[in-house]
Image: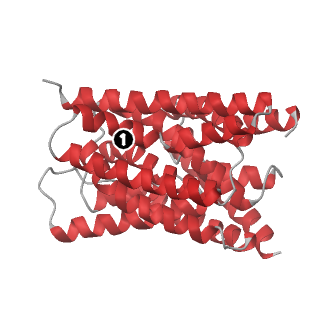
C-alpha cells in the first residue's frame, strides 16, 4: 500500500464517516462501496475492513451514549449472543460467496435500508413503555437481532438500521434509547464477524488502520452537522446516495 | 456502592482505550513493515467487546454480570477458533 493509497483511504473514509454521521446510518453502508469502487480492495475484503471500522466507531459511539445515560446495557447484553451468532454464520458464508453475488446482495440491502428509513420517518415512533416484554416480543427481537447480525457479517454494515427499528417497534423503546443501545450492542457482532474474516485472511491491518483514522473524526463531524441540516435535505441526500450505490453495485455485480 | 451508570461509563471507556491501542498497533505495523504488529492490532480490535464485558463482570451486578460473562465466553471462543484456523 503506497502513501497515496493511505491518503485516499483516510480522505475517502473521512467523507464516508461524515455521511454516516450526518445521515445516522453508520459508516459501513457507504464504506464498503467506497473501498470497492475506489479500487482499494475487493468486495469481501471491503466487508471485512468495514466490520473492523464498526468495532472502532461502536466503541466511540458507546462512550457518547453512556455519557448521555440513554444506553440500556441489559438489553444490549441480552441481544449480543444472537447478533454474534448471526454475524459468525454470515461471515463464514461470505468466505465462500462470489464477489458479484455480494455486490448484488448489497444493493438489495441498501434498498431495504432506504425503505426502513423512509417508513420510520413517515410513521414516526410511539412513546416507549417500560412494561416487561412478553415472551413473543422477546423471541421476535432475538430473531431480529440474529438477522441483523447476519446482515452485518455478510455486508459489513453495523446493523443499526435493522436493530433500531426492532427495538422501537418490538420492545417499544424510545428512539433515542434504541439508538444508544444499538451503538453499544453492535460492537460484539462486528468483532465476531471480523474474527471470522481474520481467519479467512481477508483483513489487511494497514487499510483497517487508515479507514478507522478517517471514519472516526468524520463520524463525529457528521453527527454535529446533522443538527444544522433539515430532515428533508438529509432524506433526499440519503435516497440519492443509496440509488447511486444500488446502481453501481448492480452494474458491477451483474457484469 | 458502584452506580449502574458509572459501571457502563467505565466499561465503554475501557473498550475505547483498547480500540485506540489496537489502531495504534496496526498503524505502527503498517509504518514499520512489521506484519506481526498489524496482526496483533487486529486481534486486539476484535477483543474490544471482551474488554468492556470484563469491566461489567468486575464492577457490575445481577443479570448484567451473567450476560457479560456469557458475552466474554462467546467472543473468546470465536476469536480463539479464528486464530487457530488462520494458522
Q: Is residue A105 visible?
A: yes
Crowding at mark 1 (Cα within 10 Å: few <14, some 14-19, many 20+) = many
- The one of A247 and A103 positioned closer to us in this rendering: A103
Residue in view at x 55 percent, y 53 percent: A195
- The one of B5 and A206 positioned closer to us in this rendering: A206
Residue in view at x 47 percent, y 30 percent: B16
Q: Residue furthest top?
A: B1
**Residue A199 position in % (x across, y down):** 62, 57
Which quarter of the rendered picture does the C terminus of chain A lie within?
bottom right
In the picture of the structure, the residue carrying the numbered disc 1 is A180
Q: Chain of mark 1?
A: A
Left or right: where B48 falls relative to A142:
right
Left or right: where A17 falls relative to A151:
right
Residue in view at x 67 percent, y 41 percent: A208
| Figure quadrant of residue A4 | top right
Q: Is residue A199 above or below residue A60?
A: below
**Residue A183 position in % (x across, y down):** 42, 44
**Residue A251 position in % (x across, y down):** 79, 70
Q: Is residue B31 above or below residue A98?
A: above
Q: Is residue A225 visible?
A: no
Left or right: where A92 falls relative to B54:
right
Q: Secondary structure at mark 1?
A: helix
**Residue A248 position in % (x across, y down):** 76, 63
Residue in view at x 26 percent, y 50 percent: B67
- The one of B84 and A216 positioned closer to us in this rendering: B84
Amino acid at each position: 500500500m503506497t502513501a497515496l493509497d493511505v491518503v485516499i483511504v483516510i480522505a475517502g473514509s473521512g467523507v464516508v464517516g461524515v455521511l454516516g454521521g450526518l445521515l445516522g446510518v453508520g459508516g459501513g453502508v457507504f464504506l464498503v462501496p467506497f473501498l470497492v469502487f475506489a479500487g482499494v480492495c475487493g468486495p469481501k475484503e471491503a466487508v471485512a475492513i468495514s466490520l473492523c471500522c464498526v468495532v472502532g466507531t461502536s466503541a466511540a459511539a458507546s462512550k457518547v451514549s453512556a455519557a448521555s445515560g440513554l444506553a440500556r446495557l441489559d438489553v444490549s447484553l441480552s441481544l449480543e449472543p444472537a447478533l454474534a451468532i448471526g454475524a459468525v454464520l454470515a461471515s463464514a458464508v461470505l468466505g465462500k460467496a462470489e464477489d458479484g453475488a455480494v455486490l448484488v446482495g448489497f444493493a438489495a440491502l441498501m434498498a431495504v435500508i432506504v425503505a426502513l428509513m423512509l417508513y420510520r420517518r413517515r410513521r414516526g415512533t410511539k412513546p416507549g413503555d417500560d412494561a416487561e416484554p412478553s415472551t413473543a416480543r422477546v423471541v421476535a427481537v432475538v430473531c431480529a437481532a440474529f438477522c441483523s447480525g447476519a446482515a452485518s457479517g455478510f455486508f459489513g454494515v453495523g446493523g443499526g438500521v435493522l436493530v433500531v427499528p426492532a427495538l422501537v417497534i418490538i420492545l417499544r423503546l424510545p428512539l433515542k434509547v434504541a439508538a444508544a443501545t444499538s451503538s453499544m450492542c453492535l460492537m460484539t457482532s462486528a468483532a465476531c464477524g471480523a474474527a471470522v474474516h481474520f481467519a479467512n485472511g481477508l483483513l489487511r491491518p494497514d487499510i483497517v488502520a487508515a479507514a478507522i483514522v478517517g471514519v472516526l473524526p468524520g463520524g463525529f463531524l457528521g453527527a454535529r452537522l446533522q443538527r444544522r441540516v433539515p430532515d428533508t435535505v438529509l432524506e433526499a441526500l440519503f435516497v440519492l446516495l443509496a440509488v447511486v450505490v444500488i446502481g453501481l453495485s448492480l452494474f458491477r455485480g451483474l457484469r | 456502592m458502584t452506580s449502574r451508570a458509572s459501571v457502563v461509563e467505565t466499561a465503554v471507556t475501557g473498550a475505547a482505550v483498547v480500540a485506540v491501542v489496537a489502531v495504534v498497533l496496526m498503524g505502527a505495523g503498517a509504518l514499520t513493515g512489521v506484519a506481526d504488529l498489524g496482526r496483533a492490532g487486529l486481534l486486539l480490535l476484535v477483543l474490544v467487546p471482551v474488554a468492556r464485558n470484563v469491566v461489567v463482570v468486575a464492577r457490575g451486578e445481577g443479570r448484567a454480570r451473567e450476560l457479560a460473562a456469557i458475552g466474554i465466553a462467546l467472543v473468546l471462543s470465536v476469536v480463539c477458533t479464528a486464530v487457530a484456523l488462520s494458522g
